[in-house]
Amino acid sequence: MGWKVAVVGATGQVGREMLSILAERQFPATEVVALASAKSIGTEVSFGDHTLKVKALEDFDFRGTDIALFSAGGAVAAAWAPKAAATGAVVVDNSSHFRMDPDVPLVVPEVNAGALGLYAKRRIIANPNCSTAQMVVALKPLHDFARIKRVVVSTYQSVSGAGNKGMDELFNQTKALFVSEQVPARKFTKQIAFNVIPHIDVFLDDGYTKEEWKMTAETRKILDPDIAVTATCVRVPVFVGHSESLNIEFEQPITAAQASAILREAPGCMVVDRHEDGGYMTPVECVGDYATFISRIRRDPTVEGGRGLALWVVSDNLRKGAALNAVQIAELLIARHLKKAA
């Protein structure tokens, strides 16, 4: 027997990507329901070769739904995820609302699949921040080998991380600047076209942004609470695909060759690292792919004892950073935890 799946936020970028990935991976669903706000009733969204008509979340009865994939923001998740869970559905939420709840597992399947068993406490599982997800996929196999002490990360995050309005702003500003017109910044705090903005989410009292705090707190919850992380998160004029520059300090020595060999065998990782022009991955090339790509693997000579590495990590933020990770969680749920009545 198959499973009934609801996708909440089905008209958004990540919601549409969830539907696409469910179809691509032939998720064993007998029914898939597309949900969004009442203003989207009747909107058509693609699900493989099929078209689904969007239903209103406000009117939907989750009884009989096995898995609900949420990608509709923190306020919607706070209001509706517990209601869906109370009917017996398991919620996989892409917002930040539940990530640091001690009773909600925060899961990246390649990294901490064992945490999934904790879902039963609230029947809610949290998806991490997109920049955290790709980073911990790359860090996990290296941590297992040499134990990571500290990570310094600078991100280069695409405008799709800010939703449709972010992508529209980059497109409209770029087009306007070519004809010497001005388009004011609305979604972002400064012009994003032909610019970079070292500011994602709100500022906190210590001078870091909430996006930077998320990378620190989520990495510790997913991977190891003893890892020190400091992040600088930057929005760049790229439509899709997040990039990250990592400097890693380990407890034990590790060479670039060892790291490359480890990462080539690690789940979810793809090493593209030739020391030549173009021998590395960029965000344009990762779009539509499932993998987390690692390039520019090299020794960090500022860390003594051969205990430092520098890496370049690239991934499709709408896929591994959001929709793919949620679908992988759903796949693990039905493989390891959920039982379907005969």
Image (cartoon, helix red, strand yellow):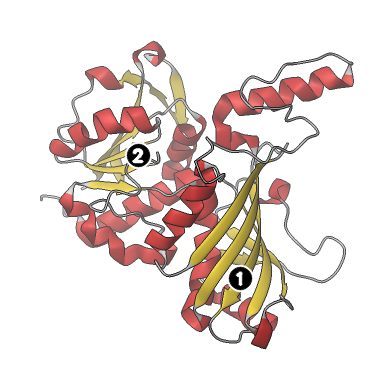
Residue 188 screen position, x and y as percent? 64, 27
In this picture, residue 41 sits left or right of residue 197: left
Depth check: give the residue in front, 182 or 251. 251
- Identify the element where label 2 is drawn: loop
In the displayed structure image, the side of residue 120 where residue 216 appears, left or right: right
Residue 320 lies, with reference to residue 271, above or below; the image says: above
Q: Position of residue 140 (x, y in %)?
A: 48, 70
Residue 257 numbered tag: none
Question: Residue shown at 32%/43% (left/top)?
Answer: 98
State the residue at coordinates (74%, 38%).
196
Alpha carbons under labels 1 and 2: distance apart? 29 Å
Residue 233 visible: yes
In contact (CB < 8 Å): disc 1 and disc 2: no
| The quarter of the displayed image where residue 245 is located | bottom right
Horizontal arrangement in the rendering, residue 313 relative to residue 13 (left or right):
right
Q: Nearer the viewer, residue 113 or 340?
A: 113
Marker disc for residue 248: 1
Specify whether 276 is left or right of 164: right
Which structural element holds mark 1? strand
Residue farthest to the left?
Answer: 342
Give residue 315's position: percent from left, percent from top.
60, 52
How far across and down, in percent of the image, does residue 130 sit? 51, 47
Vertical arrangement, residue 180 with respect to residue 337, above or below: above
Q: Does label 1 or label 2 sit earlier along the sequence?
A: 2
Q: Residue at x 28, y 48 (%)?
A: 101
| Residue 231 position (above or below residue 144) | above
Instruction: Assess disc 1: are there few (<14), some (14-19) or many (≥20) residues with their C-alpha within 10 Å of its C-alpha.
Output: many
Residue type at tag 2: His
Rendered residue at 29%/62% (across/down) = 115
Circle 2 residues within 10 Å: few <14, some 14–19, many ≥20:
some
Amino acid, disc 1? Ile
**For mark 2, what is the residue?**
97
